[in-house]
Image (spheres, helix red, strand yellow):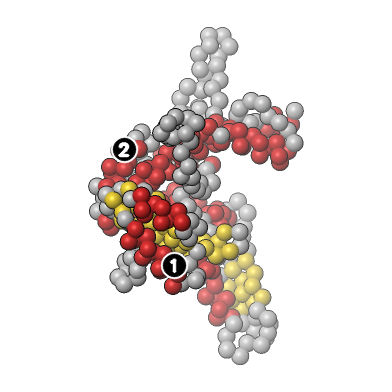
């Protein structure tokens, strides 16, 4: 980075740091006391370089907005960048490098809803808060979500901000690792929201379940309060996995068969293309608490395939909307659009 202070000051950024706050500090210094000239700021990004990949990752995570960065310490900022982010910068994959044991975290995609829920209930309160924080970072796109670790804050355990449609969203989360959660925590959380107009929404999260009274109270304050129980936490994981499967179904996955003997040609993970992290956008899951009694008397259904069923259709509709070409077979290929 180079700064030139003169009668017509300029700030020129190149060889960028991960943390854009470093560049902003240089810009602030250019607006020194007594400065009467307009400060001109230029940023140079070289195409097809590590710097460009860094910029893409920061932009995707919403880490180029000053309102977001200002609430992060250096340590918080580093934690917002994952090992997969670093591998993407250098165009590497997990199989080509040795990753420390502490970084080899992977969700067990074979776990059932009950197994995930039981696992949440066995976490310590601190571990549960960290698990919820990571969910907000990775699933909801709040890159600067952090555990507050404060007392006397109305029970707030996690706070986060992000820019949505040009507006700053500031949310708070209260975590309860309880079997049953009544209305008292919900009323407390609503009181915190009422006392601070800058807060957009509050979330009450538990590894257990909410009483009927608590659920009704949160529904009456929908838009300001949202309650997420252990089954929903586990269910979000299932839905997100289904969405990624749908992306693969629509754009990548295709079994090829040998015309001579009918055997699959691409029968290994080396040849069969599936969607990976880089192909999946941030996925937000919301459950509508309206049982479908047309399905059965209980209004209940299995959650495993629900997230998958409509994704391929939605993507092909989007392709039609963008190109005018209606594709009738999967996966969607460039040949389909050029025919």
Q: Residue furthest bottom?
A: 34
* Residue closer to the observer: 194 or 75: 194
Of 284 and 55, nearer the camera is 284
- Residue 316 pos. (x, y %): 64, 34
- 67 or 273: nearer the viewer: 67
Residue 95 at x, y percent in the picture: 41, 39
The quarter of the image holding the C terminus is top right
* Above or below, 197 relative to 54: below
In screen coordinates, is 228 left or right of 48? Answer: left
Across and down, in percent, residue 15 comes to 55, 64
Marks 2, 1: nearer the viewer: 1
Find the distance from the CA under tag 2 to the CA under tag 1: 33 Å
Q: Which mark is residue 193?
A: 1
* Quadrant of image for the N terminus: bottom right
Q: Helix, strand, or loop for circle 1?
A: helix
User: What residue do we see at 54% from left, 46% from top?
Assistant: 281
Which numbered tag is attached to residue 266?
Answer: none
Report whether residue 229 is seen. Answer: yes
Task: Tell me which numbered mark, 2 or 1, is placed earlier along the sequence.
Answer: 2
| Placement of 100 over or under 329, stated as above or below | below
Callout 2 crowding tier (Cα within 10 Å): few <14, some 14–19, many ≥20: few
For residue 104, which quarter of the picture?
A: top left
Residue at figure coordinates x 61%, y 27% from the top left: 330
Q: Which residue is mark 2?
A: 114
Q: Quadrant of residue 117?
A: top left
Is 105 situated left or right of 52 in this image?
left
């Amino acid at each position: 980075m180079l700064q030139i202070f003169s009668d017509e000051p300029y700030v020129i950024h190149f060889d960028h740091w991960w943390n854009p706050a470093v560049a902003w500090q240089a810009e602030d210094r250019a607006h020194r006391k007594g400065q009467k000239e307009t400060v001109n700021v230029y940023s140079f990004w070289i195409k097809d370089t590590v710097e460009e990949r860094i910029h893409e990752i920061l932009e995707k995570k919403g880490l180029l907005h000053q309102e977001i960065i200002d609430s992060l310490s250096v340590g918080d900022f580093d934690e917002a960048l994952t090992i997969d982010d670093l591998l993407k910068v250098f165009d590497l994959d997990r199989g080509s490098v040795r990753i420390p044991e502490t970084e080899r975290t992977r969700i067990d995609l074979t776990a059932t809803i009950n197994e995930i829920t039981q696992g949440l209930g066995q976490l310590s309160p601190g571990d549960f808060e960290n698990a919820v924080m990571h969910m907000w970072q990775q699933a909801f796109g709040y890159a600067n979500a952090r555990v507050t670790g404060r007392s006397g804050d109305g029970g707030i355990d996690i706070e986060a901000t992000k820019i949505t449609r040009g507006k700053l969203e500031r949310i708070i989360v209260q975590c309860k690792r309880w079997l049953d959660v009544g209305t008292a925590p919900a009323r407390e959380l609503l009181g915190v929201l009422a006392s601070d107009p800058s807060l957009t929404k509050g979330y009450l999260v538990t590894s257990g379940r909410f009483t009927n009274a608590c659920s009704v109270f949160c529904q009456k304050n929908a838009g300001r309060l949202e309650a997420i129980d252990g089954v929903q936490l586990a269910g979000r994981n299932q839905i997100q996995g289904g969405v990624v499967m749908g992306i693969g179904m629509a754009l990548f996955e295709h079994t090829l068969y040998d015309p001579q003997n009918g055997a699959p040609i691409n029968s290994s993970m080396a040849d069969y293309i599936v969607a990976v992290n880089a192909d999946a956008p941030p996925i937000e899951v919301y459950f509508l608490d309206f049982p479908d009694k047309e399905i059965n008397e209980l209004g209940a259904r299995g959650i495993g395939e629900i997230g998958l069923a409509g994704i391929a259709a939605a993507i092909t509709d989007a392709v039609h909307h963008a190109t005018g070409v209606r594709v009738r077979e999967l996966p969607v290929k460039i040949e389909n659009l050029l025919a």
